Amino acid sequence: MQGRPAGPRGRPADPQGQPAGPQRQPASPQGRHAGPQGQPAGPLGRHTGPLCCGRCAGAQAAAKVARRQHFRAAVFARPGGGLSGEEPTAGAGPTASAGPTASAGPTARAGRTASADHGAEGAGRFRTVTGTLVDVSPHILVVATGDGERRLALAPGGPVWRGRLASATELRPGERVVVRLAPGRRDVADKVWASIGRVAGTISASDSGELMVEEGTTRRPQVVVIAPAAANQIRVRFPQLEPGNLIDVIGLRRGAVLEALIPATAQPAYLASRVTRGRAVVKTAAHTFSGSATWHEPAEPGEEPRGIAYPAVDPAAGCAETTLTAPGPAELPYLAVGSLLSVRNECTGAARVLPVTGCGAAARLFHDRCLTCGTSPRGRVADLTLVSFAELGGDLERACFNATVTVWP
C-alpha cells in the first residue's frame, strides 16, 4: 500500500495535499485571534472582555476590578450619571426593564429615587444637602444633617462659594453649608454655598455703617454690616441707606449679623411706605403667571425647608403680615397658606410643586425684574425658601431666576 506524502514536520497530508492536523488561524495585527463581536483574544484563546481579569485570576481579582470600575464611575462621571462619552443607561429611568444590569447599578437606583421625589417633574431634577460642615478636604466634604453625617465627593471643577468663588480648603468646620448634588448622584456635590445669607426689607435704623432691617412682622429684625471691599458696589445700587428705604443684599452670615457683599437688586425710587407699581407680573394662561422668583433664609431653625412665601396671601387667612401697608400685585390671585403652586425655573427647566408656607412681605415691596436669563416681567411672584430655590437650579448668589407659577392643581 502506497503511503501518503508527508507534510511539514513529518505529518501525513490528506489526499488534497493539505497537511493534516489542526489549522492555525492567521494572526491579527496585534498578534491575537479575533474573538466574537470583533473582540481580541488572548494567547490562550480566551477573549479579553471587561471581566477577563476576573475569569483568569479568580474571584479576588474580579472583586478588585469591580471596585476599580465603581471608583472610576464615581470620579469621572459627568452630571447625569454616565461616564464621559457614554449615553445614559436604560436602567436610570423609572420605566426601565428589571434586568440584572438595570436594577444593580448605582445610576439606576439614583434614577428611581429621584423620580419618586414629591414635586420632581421632567428635566432638571436637583437635590440638596444642608447642615453643618464637620470636616473638609480638597475632594471630600463631611456634613452633619438631621439624619446623620453625609460624606460627599466634590465634582471636578465644582464651584464653592464663600463670599466669592473659593477652594474647598477655605471652608471651615462649623459653617452652615448648602450643597446641591449632581443630577442623578446621591454622593457627589455639584455646587457648595457656605455661610450664605440674605436680608431684604425696610431699613429701620442706621448707625456707623450698621443697618437694622425689618423683613416683616413675623420675622426678627436683621443686622447688616456692609463689607468695606463691597461698599462701592453696594452704594451704587443702594445709594440711600437712611431709615425708610428698601434694601436687598446677599453676603456671609456671621451669627446674627450679615456681612453684605452683593446687591441683590437695584434700590426702588420709592420709600417702603409709598410703594408704587407699574405694569406688574404677566398672566400667560388661566391661573398661570410669570415674574421673578427670589429666596429667603429660614426665620427659625425648625422652619419648613421647602415652600413659598407668597406675596398675595388672602387677608381672610389671618396672616400676620396683613398689617403691612404695601399692596399686593393686582395680577396675583389671593391664596391661603397651605395652597399648592407649581413653580418652574425658566432658566433651567426644573419645576416643583411647593406649598405656600407664609406671607411674602418683602416680595410685596419690590417691583423689580430678574435678568438671570433674559428679562422677566416686573414683580416677585414667589419668595422661595433657600432649599427650594437651590433645588430648582437657582444659584443663590444670583438672587433670582425667571419663573412661571401655576396654581395647583
Image (spheres, rainbow, N blue to C red):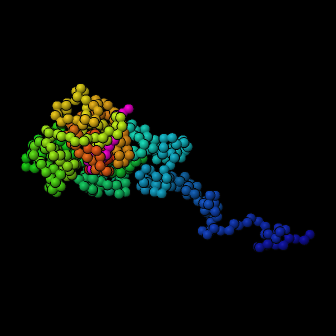
Displayed quadrant of residue 24: bottom right
Q: Nearer the viewer, residue 117 or 342?
A: 342
Tell me residue 348's x, y (percent). 36, 48
Q: Is residue 297 visible?
A: no
Give the quadrant of the C terminus: top left
For the stretch drawn in magenta, what is the main secondary structure?
Answer: strand
Q: Specify the segment rendered in magenta.
A: 398-409
Residue at image position (37%, 54%) is 155
Q: Nearer the viewer, residue 283 or 265?
A: 283
The verdict on residue 288 being magenta is no
Residue at image position (30%, 41%) is 282
Residue at image position (62%, 66%) is 32
Which residue is at the far right?
Answer: 1
Tell me residue 278's x, y (percent). 22, 42
Q: Is residue 328 visible?
A: yes
Work out whether 396 lies above or below 8. above
Q: Nearer the viewer, residue 398 or 281?
A: 281
Work out whether 242 lies above or below 286. below
Q: Nearer the viewer, residue 298 or 326?
A: 326
